[in-house]
């Protein structure tokens, strides 16, 4: 598997992870936040995000990497290989964080990826293929409503025209926000050719309970679930909370409540553990205690590793909407934001990750990711796989999200070994 030592991985290469620096960098990055610790909020293109980006750039340059940005702010920190035109080996994740999140989601893959590259350099590894650490723009859907915005553009899953039209809750478009943040080149230039990456491996916390429950230190992801998200507008007639008699009401929030429970029931009764659905946003208008809700806006997230099952939940949602609309005399309009295909991970990357686990005598669990990740979209232009580390109680997207130092260091070491093997 190894090419000659001069070109690839030194015969007795044993990268060592600088635990102290890696853990202190995770703590330092968490400081760039619009929420009080231990929560982290870092919305794309806010001052906290821009400061975090600048801090990451300095860390990458300190590590001897050359940093470039594309038109949507995807960050590429590159360790040049001996064979410059050869396809690149990529790793990385995201540093944007949803409101009231934790400090490990995405960050472990970015700072772990950086430390993996530094560790390889420290032990004299000289890659044939260049290695790139990516920090993807807007993995989270918080600001522009769609997740994996940067990797969708890189892979061509989202067109520049469609992306330019995205707006945040204040009506600011992606174009004016990104340009105000200094990313002014054309979105057309973001898409990468499918020959650009030889392979891509993303380190991430599991965001689920299985590894901890099974006492297995690492997970190798074989499939990434397919996310779909919808915006639903429910309009009733509102009115005075005292004056309108109950039989005469068309309460938009009561209609929304019925619909949310129908969606939950459809996911619970799909017959498979991988079917999940959440109504994560519920905006009530006018939002006065003594005024009957006249309008409700829901944002719904439905996922599955199987498109047919996910489709069945969406059909149930449609049928429930029609029934509730007729019964309560409210109007219900559903807008589909995205409905992506699930992603299969690539055997060559899965193999290198599993061989790296084996080299260190580490057990791993082959598993599915129900969280989506940028690897889902990079997988459309390159062979990808993901390496999971446990997170306590499976918690994520919460301030008490936690990954242990040992798990973070183990994941970073296995990633370093796999990157070396892929880049040799
Ligand atoms: O929602 C997700 O799956 C990811 O954490 N953005
Ligand atoms: Mn997340
Ligand atoms: Mn993530």
Image: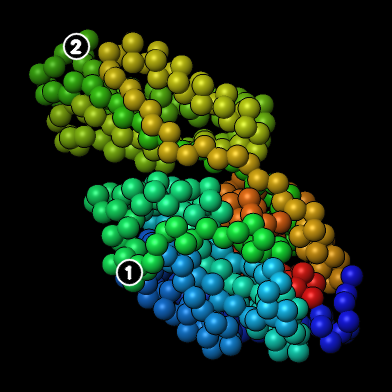
Seen in the image, is 141 located left or right of residue 135?
A: left
Please indicate whether residue 419 sits to the left or right of residue 375 in the image: right
Residue drawn at (77%, 69%) of the image: 422
Query: Measuring 34% from the left and 71% from the top, which residue is drawn there?
Result: 182
Q: Is residue 361 visible?
A: no
Image location (x, y in percent) of residue 40: 42, 64
Question: In this rendering, does residue 169 appear at all?
Answer: yes
**Residue of label 1:** 181
Q: Is mark 1 within 8 Å of ligand 1?
A: no
Does the beta carbon of the residue at mark 2 sit less than 8 Å from ligand 1?
no
Q: Residue, x 63% and y 80% (percent of image)? A: 79
**Left or right of residue 40, residue 402 in this image:** right
Could you tell me residue 312's position as x and y percent? Answer: 57, 24
Q: Nearer the viewer, residue 273 or 111?
A: 111
In the rendered image, which quarter is residue 248 located in?
Answer: top left
Q: Secondary structure at mark 2?
A: helix
Q: Which mark is residue 92?
A: none
Mark 2–mark 1 distance (CA, rounded to whole Å): 51 Å
Q: Taking 314 as reference, is 215 above or below it?
A: below
Mark nearest the camera among 2 and 1 is: 1
Q: Which residue is mark 2?
A: 248
- For marks 2 and 1, the one nearer the N-term is 1
Percent position (x, y) of residue 375? 61, 55
């Amino acid at each position: 598997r190894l090419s000659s030592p001069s070109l690839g991985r030194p015969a007795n290469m044993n990268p060592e992870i600088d635990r102290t620096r890696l853990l202190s960098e995770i703590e330092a990055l968490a400081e760039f936040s619009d929420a009080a610790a231990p929560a982290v909020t870092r919305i794309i293109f806010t001052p906290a995000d821009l400061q975090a980006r600048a801090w990451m750039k300095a860390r990458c340059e300190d590590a001897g990497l050359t940093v470039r940005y594309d038109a949507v702010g995807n960050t590429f920190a590159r360790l040049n290989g001996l064979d410059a035109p050869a396809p690149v080996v990529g790793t990385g994740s995201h540093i944007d964080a949803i409101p009231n999140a934790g400090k490990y989601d995405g960050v472990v893959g970015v700072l772990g990826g950086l430390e993996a590259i530094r560790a390889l350099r420290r032990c004299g590894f000289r890659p044939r293929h260049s290695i790139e650490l990516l920090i993807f723009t807007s993995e989270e859907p918080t600001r522009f409503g769609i997740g994996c915005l940067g990797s969708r553009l890189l892979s061509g899953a989202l067109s520049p025209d469609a992306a330019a039209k995205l707006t945040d809750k204040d009506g600011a478009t992606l174009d004016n926000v990104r340009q105000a943040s200094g990313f002014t080149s054309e979105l057309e230039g973001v898409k990468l050719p499918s020959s650009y990456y030889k392979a891509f491996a993303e380190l991430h916390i599991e965001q689920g309970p299985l590894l901890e429950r099974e006492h297995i230190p690492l997970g190798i992801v074989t499939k990434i679930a397919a996310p779909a998200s919808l915006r639903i507008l429910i309009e009733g007639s509102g009115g005075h909370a005292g004056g309108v008699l109950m039989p005469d009401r068309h309460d938009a929030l009561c209609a929304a409540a019925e619909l949310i429970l129908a969606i939950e029931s459809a996911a619970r009764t799909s017959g498979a553990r991988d079917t999940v659905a959440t109504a994560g946003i519920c905006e009530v208008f006018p939002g006065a205690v003594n005024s009957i809700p006249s309008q409700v806006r829901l944002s719904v997230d439905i996922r599955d590793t199987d498109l047919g099952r996910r489709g069945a939940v969406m059909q149930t949602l449609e049928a429930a909407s029609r029934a509730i609309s007729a019964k309560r005399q409210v109007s219900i309009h559903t807008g589909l934001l995205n409905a992506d295909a699930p992603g299969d991970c690539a055997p060559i990357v899965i193999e290198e990750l599993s061989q790296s686990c084996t080299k260190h005598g580490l057990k791993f669990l082959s598993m599915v990711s129900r969280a989506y990740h940028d690897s889902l979209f990079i997988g459309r232009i390159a062979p990808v796989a993901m390496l999971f580390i446990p997170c306590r109680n499976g918690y994520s997207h919460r301030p008490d999200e936690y990954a242990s130092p040992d798990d973070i260091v183990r994941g970073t070491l296995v990633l370093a070994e796999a990157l070396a093997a892929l880049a040799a």
